[in-house]
Image: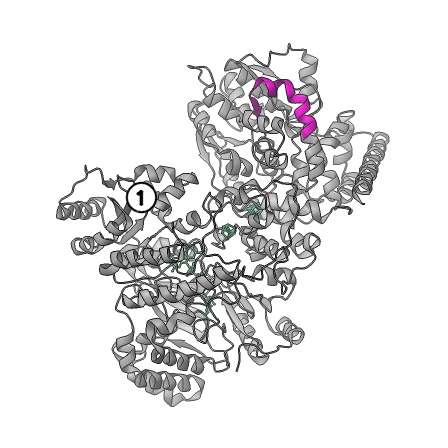
Amino acid sequence: MTEHQEVDLAALERALRTEVDGEVRFDAGSRGAYATDGSNYRQVPLGVVVPRTVEAGANAVAVCSRFAAPVLSRGGGTSLGGQCTNEAVVVDWTKYCNRLLSVDPQARTCVVEPGIVLDELNRQLAPHNLMFGPKPSTHSHCALGGMIGNNSCGASAQAYGKTVDNLRRLEVITYEGARFWAGPTSDEEYARIVAEGGARARLYQGLRDVTGRHLAEIRRGYPKIPRRVSGYNLDSLLPENGFDVARALVGSEGTLVTVLHAELELVDVPAAEALLVLGFDDIYAAADAVPQLLEHSRPSQLEAIDGRMAQLMREEHAYLDSLERLPEGDSWLLLQFTADTKEEADEQAYELLRALGRDEDDASVALSDDPAREQEMLKAREAGLGVTARPPDGSETWEGWEDSAVAPERLGDYLRDLERLFGRYGYQQASLYGHFGQGCVHTRIPFRLREGKGIEAFRAFLFDAADLVASYGGSLSGEHGDGQARGELLPRMFGQPLVDAMGEVKALFDPDNRMNPGKVIHPRRVDDSLRLGADWRPVPRETHFAFADDGHDFGRAVLRCVGVGNCRTHQGGVMCPSYRATREEEHSTRGRARLLFEMLGGHDDSPVTGGWRSTAVRDALDLCLACKGCKSDCPVGVDMATYKAEFLAHHYQGRLRPAAHYTMGWLPLWARLARTAPGLANATLHAPGLGRLGKRLAGIDPRRAAPVFAPASFQESWRRAGRPEPDPRDPRTVLLWPDTFTNHFHPHIADAAVRVLEDAGFHVAVPAGPVCCGLTWISIGQLATARRVLTRTTHVLRPWLEAGTPIVGLEPSCTAVFRADAPDLLADDQDIQRLAAQTRTFAEQLVNHTPDGWQPPRTSRAATVQTHCHQHAILGADPDRELMRRAGIDADVLDAGCCGLAGNFGFERGHYDLSQAIAEQGVLPAVRDTAPSAFVLADGFSCRTQIDQAATGRHALHLAEALALAMDGPPPSDLPEMAVPRPQPRPAPARLLAAGVAGGLTGLAAAAVLAARNRARRTP
Ligand SMILES: Cc1cc2nc3c(=O)[nH]c(=O)nc-3n(C[C@H](O)[C@H](O)[C@H](O)COP(=O)(O)OP(=O)(O)OC[C@H]3O[C@@H](n4cnc5c(N)ncnc54)[C@H](O)[C@@H]3O)c2cc1C
Ligand code: SF4
Ligand code: SF4
């Protein structure tokens, strides 16, 4: 049967909905989000099934089989060879089928479901001091099903081998419904299976038959190197290898069976590690040294980094600490040794150095004795793909020949030949790095995948490279699998007879070619179904933001996402809170980037239609918190918050927006209006019935309490105090930025900041008139308004901008606008560029710019500190840490992700549950665990509000408040925040409430009129 056959999609979808316990999605958004994996390929799936149980997943396969619909299992979707994209029903195992079912510590085995993520598995195994040995770089988000599918491994393969070497049994189901546990099969067991008869017996007999007929080819044709991943593992079926059907199925990339459960073999977690780094003149010399190193030592990892990668890291300001630790040289080998004690691990390194006639003091040798540093350096190596994917010079590099492998003894010569081949095709400057201890080389190549000639060259190069590696007795893939990128090349490595034998195995398991068709065996051409391709024609789009780092091209910005999938991690950093809480591809940074890519309209078969008006894209972006976590945490800096703002600007152009856009989005304006009667505004917003009605009208979730306006804004109090305005040119003058949140809701923070700044010797100025950074308009995509607001603000700030006065921000999100969004939105405005350059955080001003000798007030307290996401992404928190250190604050700076409120996001109707779920993943439990005597510190208004409203019994302070408290002597021993005033709502008489409602409604009506007028102005 051919790969293509009409499937009755409507009937298939109905049957899946009726018969499968799971989420069944055939909508444009889901299909768009799953159209690409981490590879160069793109195929739009028929639909997506997210089974709630393994049984339901097996049912889904059965239903697809009835409809003759192709099936593709999916884990983290990080495959690089195109094996995880297909015109098939995608079964995503990761959301629900992700349990560790049992552990046998004595036997050192465990049983897992296919969707469990490797790091999560190892976290759960940690109490037994056990772990699964193979560890791909994507360990924080790749799933065991995917690892089995690809026969994955990583640096640790030097010690533990590949997935195939660490697997006991698999429970599988075939497309035709045979379900069984497979493993090594003794002759007795084989006889029993055959005697039972049925589909399994036929399969086993068939496998014996194929192996028997191709015995000599199998024994001869599989390279005897550590990193052969290409092809089916027919060698596992050899009698001398125990006719191991489970291991034969490992690495079959979903083309033979669906894996339902796996019994894994586990290893001990190493007690101690040492890292030795050796420098070399170039990467070839490093490769040449490998055999000698292996002769004298048994490292648990032997990794390589070349000078090109180090250079890119420097240019991208990534892993600078690790680079500093590298010894002299242009390229480096990193050897890790493990043992029961640190001394034993170190001794292995010393022993090797002695054997080489080198010692620790050589300039080209570095021996680390700091485990954290060691991990950081190995992480830098692991980050290779991200670092080399989008070099700062704007060029693009691609996978395709990214993991070939040869015997380690021949690596140096192979690399020299490969470099020559690069030269012939004009692919200079490719970084070469990887698992040199096992002869596996990583690289990304500047293929030209948007034009016919470039694609011809890509194809020709792959064939030449395949011949080259085959001439070395190597493997096309040493790690990532074949998929579509290597399927067509397999005969060059194995020869046609062996590939025919693999074809026979395919026919046994999947006679109609419905399991992940077109991959590995009977493959599509290597240059088919490319994500870009010569006929890719995205519609050019005018944008509000400049996208200067992407050649002023929104399409290029969207293309940044290379599919690594770090945005699917479960812990650490900020990216991506909506994925962490939903476990939905569509609500990950990658899913959103994929949908925006589809929206560009470059491919005729895109499920996403309507361009900027696409509701599928709008829905995927709806749960993006615009936290900017991806801007810093994604290895290639995908900046989804900005893409979302840009999208919303066009999506709603000339149309009525959701109510919250006019209420929360225009907050600075309402806050100014509320100044006429703040008490009345508070009473109206907090009166039980009226408040609820008001929230409904305003598009705010009824469970959210409105923030409370302070009786007087900070600017009002400042004006009333009549303080003389300092000279902007005086070097001691700083301008304190009165952001909306501090000014109207928490003015005490600004008062506190003034005290501390003055204590440090600064003269504080405050703008007299209304000013605003435009943040709320940016986050809802009212970008023309945001531009107007920013321009007006720079007019007010002009004297300070011209004098070069530092502008000190207290609210991280507003400060981040000045540093990042504003210069991108008004790229040609010199005042905006000055504003960006002159803006500092409170801590930056006090740590980096105070007169010598100033010490902050000391308060010897512990503190739980929540860093605002925008601070994490744009501003950095090192000066804050230093300021706290100098103040004697023992800070536990949380690595717990976003607070979940993120400006207006958590207030908007429909977002409350997600907002709370995100907060409960880290921030709120940490606040609850904070000792009563300790501070809870959060500089972001959103974070403070989320903590306040979660009834943790604690209220968060701004760092400025904690320091100002310390100036007055020791704060209360318990709940120090009680010493700080916060506005409280007061009830008001009914008559006044009615007036308040009338005023609010009038405001909303005025907003609607204004919006309509703006719309009319824009409509031609
Ligand atoms: C930046 C980067 C670095 C990488 N580094 C490494 C590395 O160090 N080592 C390495 O080996 N790989 C690496 N890879 C490739 C990839 O991450 C790994 O192979 C990973 O283990 C795949 O896991 P996954 O869950 O993402 O699998 P997916 O991509 O989801 O799936 C992989 C294959 O398994 C099949 N599959 C998934 N679940 C099942 C199931 N239940 N039944 C049957 N088949 C199934 C899929 O159909 C597909 O063919 C890297 C990729 C990237 C992007
Ligand atoms: S958004 Fe970033 S982290 Fe996520 S897949 Fe794309 S490149 Fe990777
Ligand atoms: S801005 Fe935040 S929520 Fe949105 S995609 Fe990026 S990390 Fe996820």
- How many numbered discs sit on the rendered protein? 1
Q: Of helix, strand and loop, which mostly describes the magenta segment?
A: helix
Compared across the picture, whether 577 is left or right of 698 comes to: left
Tell me if residue 665 can be seen.
no
Identify which residue, 327 or 153, lies in the foreground. 327
Amino acid residing under circle 1: Glu
Asked if the magenta segment contains residue 10, the reply would be no
Compared across the picture, whether 404 is left or right of 708 comes to: left
Q: Give the range drawn in magenta.
A: 791-813
Q: Is mark 1 on a helix, strand or loop?
A: helix
* Residue 301 screen position, x and y as percent: 28, 53
* Residue 97 screen position, x and y as percent: 50, 64
Q: Quadrant of the image for the C terminus?
A: top right
The quarter holding residue 746 reads top right
Q: Is 596 drawn above or below residue 357 in the view shown?
A: below
Where does label 1 land, which residue? Answer: 374
Compared across the picture, whether 268 is left or right of 860 comes to: left
* Residue 49 screen position, x and y as percent: 58, 67
**Colour treatment of the image:** one colour
The quarter holding residue 919 reads top right
* Residue 539 screen position, x and y as percent: 64, 54
Q: Which residue lies furthest to the top in this view?
A: 724
Q: Is 366 drawn above or below residue 107 in the view shown?
A: above
Identify which residue, 702 or 57, lies in the foreground. 57
Asked if the magenta segment contains residue 800, the reply would be yes
Tell me if residue 936 can be seen.
yes
